Amino acid sequence: MIYTEDKICQIKKPLKLKSGEVLESYNLTYETHGVLSKNSNNAVLVCHALNASHHIAGIRKTTKDLGWWDNMIGPGKPIDTDSFFVIGVNNIGSCFGSTGPASINPKTGKPYGSDFPLLTVEDWVNSQAVFADFLGIKKFVAIIGGSLGGMQVLQWSISFPDRLENAIIIASTARLTAQNIAFNEIARRAIITDKSFHGGDYYSENTFPNIGLSIARMLAHITYLSQDGMTEKFGRNLQEKKDYSFSYEIDFQIESYLRYQGEKFSHKFDANSYLLITRVLDYFDPAGEANGDLVKALKVVKAKFLLISFTSDWRFSPSHSKELVSALLENNVQVSYSEIKSEYGHDSFLLEDPGYHELIRVFFSNML
């Protein structure tokens, strides 16, 4: 097993955000796998989704936890670290080492809290480009991401078309639907209305909005699963009993599962970061910069694309990927697309499906 450790990139160059605010300096926490070639032409950037981090593979030395995409990245795996230099970086605003709401604001000496500026995918990509300069990488052979990570890949192809050769977008979209924005708003309200939220300044109150964050996670988790997958795993099975309790305690296995997931998440994620990142999701809309015309927005892209969707993913359904494929083809971009049959909903992109992994393996082997 490969052991990894966190690295920190301290960036003292101001980052002007799309909102107009400026981060005078910031830290990005990252990890790397493999060896960067002498001419720096084998670098792969992995962009993470909402609740993930830079810890993409291997076992972290300190906490012993496994990287969230360990089944995809490593020696001999689809993204083969014997050939590629693979980088995971924690986005600013997150809560796994990079500068975010829980970080100390140098102007006040206290945590930023709700004063941390709102961000966009463009801001993340701009900070990642500065980070690439720090590593001496002028061009990525590939940038890959699922869900919110896929949005970052798409934005890279627009913001820095000369700095990536291959773009791999998995279970993602070019813009959220009204339904998706609605789910995010319910999650945010659950957090903001928690009596322990204190306007985002819960750090100084020595408390935490665990209940609100737990509910937000439970709601999100439902959207990551499919109906068939949930039925197969839980059905209407009762939790360690033969009949209903006729109370509001746990009766069904699915209730127990969701409460467990929510509780676990509320102890490892920062609520202010959750609020911020769901807003990043809401704001992403490259077509909005081109009067709603996605084809026009993608006119500048130069990378080769691979897009993958999953049949049971109802949050970012295959239609989202097909819209993007169509817009890319309108621009004569080289693009491959595959729709993978799966019963596991949006979470399918995290799982070890043989057909899915073989697609990634072949696409990366063609870069060598």
Image (tube, rainbow, N blue to C red):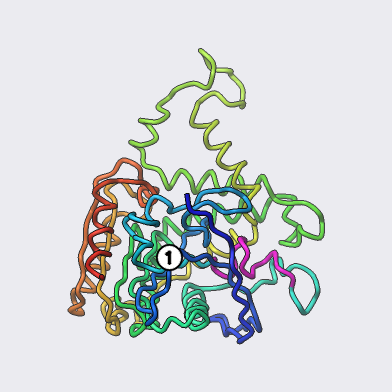
Most foreground residue, 60 or 140: 60
Q: Quadrant of residue 160?
A: bottom left
Q: Is residue 149 above or below residue 234?
A: below
In the rendered image, the residue lying farthest to the top is 242
Is 99 part of what is drawn in magenta? Answer: yes
Left or right: where 134 falls relative to 368: right
Total marks shown come to 1
Q: Residue at x 50, y 59 (%)?
A: 50
Most foreground residue, 41 or 139: 41
Q: Residue at x 45, y 63 (%)?
A: 33
Q: Quadrant of residue 30?
A: bottom right
Q: Is residue 83 visible?
A: yes
* Rendered-image quadrant of the C terminus: bottom left
Magenta segment, prevailing SS (helix, strand or loop) = loop
Q: Which element carries disc 1, helix, strand or loop?
A: loop
Is 219 part of what is drawn in magenta? Answer: no
Residue 366, given in percent of the width and then of the height, sits at: 22, 67
Q: Residue at x 54, y 66 (%)?
A: 90
Left or right: where 342 falls relative to 334: right
Residue 179, given in percent of the width and then of the height, sits at: 42, 55
- Identified by mark 1, the residue type is Gly
Most foreground residue, 307 or 57: 57
Residue 358, given in percent of the width and then of the height, sits at: 24, 53
Q: Is residue 161 above or below residue 3?
A: below
Residue 59, given in percent of the width and then of the height, sits at: 53, 51
Q: Residue at x 43, y 81 (%)?
A: 137
Q: Is residue 287 visible?
A: no
**Mark 1 sits on what residue?**
34
Q: Is residue 266 above or below residue 100?
A: above
Q: Which residues are magenta?
A: 90-104
Left or right: where 78 falls relative to 265: left
Q: Residues within 10 Å of mark 1 (few under 14, many from 20)?
A: some
